[in-house]
Amino acid sequence: MLSLSFTIREARPTDWHQIYELYNSLPLEDLYMRFFCLHRFSEEEAKRLVTLNDHVTIVVEVAGRIIGEGSLYNTGEFSLVVAPDFRGYGIGTEIVKTLIEKAKQLKMKKIFFYVLRDNIPMIRIGKKLGFKFIEEEGELMGYLEL
């Protein structure tokens, strides 16, 4: 694995614009993998990620630039995205590890994510971290009992 220095921290309200830019820099295929449809991320969605209290959002920074984001919702569901130029450094795995720790701190019983079968990198991360998978309406759900 390649080496890269990065920082993971909780998102701040002032991060919304960089999160917006991150999502809107993604190729359409990546947006499809994230949202299961072709979806352009709005400024309002970015603002909600850093202000609403039904979830925890973390960001990954490299040299002050947000290059990754992960959100853990009160239901235990989580999602993440990493900028294409920064994949292959283990950032996605570190985001999931951080979200698992957040879930444990919040006394959640399980954590889970939905993924399309074509999203091999996310499936690999899940398997590496001990997630079990079940098929649900053509998608996979990865879940981990905490």
Image (spheres, rainbow, N blue to C red):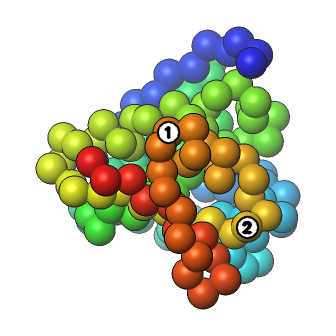
Q: Outermost residue toward the left?
A: 107
Residue at 58% from the left image edge and 46% from the top image edge: 127
Residue 55 rendering spot, x and y as whole percentages: 31, 59
Q: Which mark is residue 102?
A: none
Residue 121 rendering spot, x and y as whole percentages: 72, 47
Q: Outermost residue toward the bottom?
A: 137
Residue 136 rendering spot, x and y as whole percentages: 55, 81
Query: For numbered disc 1, what is the local secondary structure?
Result: loop
Residue 57 placement, left or right of 110? right
**Can see residue 17?**
no
Specify the quadrant of the image occupied by residue 33.
Answer: bottom right
Residue at 22% from the left image edge and 43% from the top image edge: 104
Residue 68 against residue 109 in the figure, above or below? above
Q: Which mark is residue 117?
A: 2
Count of numbered circles in the view: 2
Crowdedness of circle 2 by 10 Å Cα count: few (<14), some, many (20+)? some
Question: Which residue matches tag 1?
Answer: 129
Tell me the kind of residue under disc 1.
Leu
**Can see residue 106?**
yes
| Mark 2–mark 1 distance (CA, rounded to whole Å) | 18 Å
Query: For numbered disc 2, what is the local secondary structure?
Result: loop
Residue 31 against residue 111 in the figure, above or below? below
Is there CB contact under 8 Å for labels 2 and 1? no
Q: Of 45 and 99, which appears nearest the observer?
A: 99
> Earlier along the polypeptide chain: callout 2 or callout 1?
2
Residue at 57% from the left image edge and 20% from the top image edge: 6
Residue 140 rendering spot, x and y as whole percentages: 60, 70
Residue at 79% from the left image edge and 64% from the top image edge: 118
Specify the quadrant of the image occupied by residue 83.
Answer: top right
